[in-house]
Image (cartoon, rainbow, N blue to C red):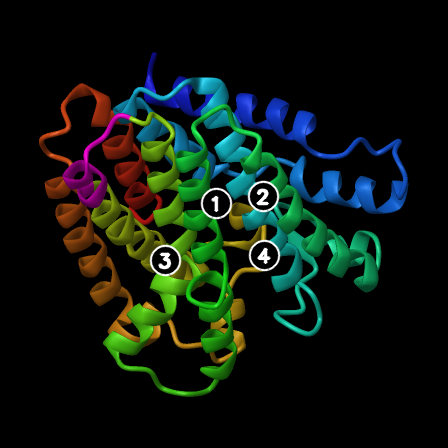
Amino acid sequence: MTFTSWMESIRQRTEVALDQYLPPASHNPTRLHEAMRYACLNGGKRFRPLLVHAAGVISGANPATLDMCACAIEMIHVYSLVHDDMPCMDDDTLRRGMPTCHVQYDEATALLVGDALQTQAFITLADVPLTAKTIAELVRTLARASGAAGMAGGQAIDLAAVGQPLNAAELEQMHIMKTGALIRAAIRMGALAGESLDTEKLERLDRYGKILGLLFQVVDDILDCTGTTEELGKTAGKDAAADKPTYVSLMGLAGARAFVDDLLTQAQHLIADSGAPGQRLKDIALEIVQRTH
């Protein structure tokens, strides 16, 4: 199977699984459930589910188990997007080429959608058919990546940094938490789901996840200033308009692109010895970088 075909198959699997693990729209409260499904089932790159499945190839995990892990982390990701788009945060009206949740419904519903998706993620993860020890580690991984030490904390730093100059170390720390934590967690969860990798291999994949998360953010910063709203499916140039610190504002466009190439080299080195099972992770890293070239 080609990499493009594999990506499409994982996206389709994820869509089917999300439909299964989200509450039916016909169940009360119907408006909340409908809005949850609107936010989750309207496409998207499904980047984090792709990482779960790619790491799961290395660990030999059951694909159905990986579907559940992928749904859990996608629910957390979507909840963060719903909240991020609200007027009290980035105040955006477009997400994945469609009206954002608070525009399509209302602010109160959007707030509840985020809250409910967060808890639904852990309901899904708690039911994976693995040992209690592994389930606990999966829950711990996702919770840490989502909370004050991860995504939520990174978002708080981001909000406080508007209009403030950040040095390279400060910018990296913010993005390791805000964007990188869930990417890193996706790889770790896929690796854990196979219940087969030793500590050294898990740590190596974890380091790879950290580098990949940073790579993803640098590319995102580049695309925010070079892409169009139609290409991105969200409002282009909003970081510059909001005076947010980015890798482009820190390094310039050429410097940011050079940093992307350096991060790709580091990532490839970390999984160089993973053989054929690691090919999907290598392909994903290249796919991220090609968006800037």
Mark 2: which amino acid?
Phe
Camera-side mark, 2 or 4: 2
Give yes or no for contact between labels 3 and 2 (Cβ–Cβ under 8 Å): no
Specify which label sits upstream in the sequence, 2 or 4. 4
Label tally: 4
Which residue does the numbered mark 3 point to in the structure image?
217
Q: Is residue 245 left or right of residue 107?
A: left
Residue shown at 62% from the left, 22% from the top: 16
**At numbered mark 2, what does the secondary structure look like: helix, strand or loop?**
helix
Return the residue nearer the eye: 230 or 182: 182
Specify which label sits upstream in the sequence, 1 or 2. 2
Q: Which mark is residue 184?
A: none
Specify which label sits upstream in the sequence, 3 or 2. 2
Spatial CA distance of label 4 from label 3 is 16 Å
In the rendered image, residue 190, in percent from the top left (x then y), is placed at: 37, 33
Which residue does the numbered mark 1 point to in the structure image?
139
Q: Which residues are magenta?
A: 196-204
Give the quadrant of residue 132: top left
Q: Mark 2, residues whose alpha carbon is within 10 Å: few (<14), some, or many (≥20)?
A: many
Mark 3: which amino acid?
Gln
Give yes or no for contact between labels 3 and 1 (Cβ–Cβ under 8 Å): no
Specify which label sits upstream in the sequence, 4 or 1. 4
Spatial CA distance of label 1 from label 2 is 7 Å
Which residue does the numbered mark 2 point to in the structure image?
122
Spatial CA distance of label 3 from label 2 is 26 Å
Give yes or no for contact between labels 4 and 1 (Cβ–Cβ under 8 Å): no
Spatial CA distance of label 3 from label 1 is 24 Å
In the rendered image, residue 53, in percent from the top left (x then y), is placed at: 39, 28
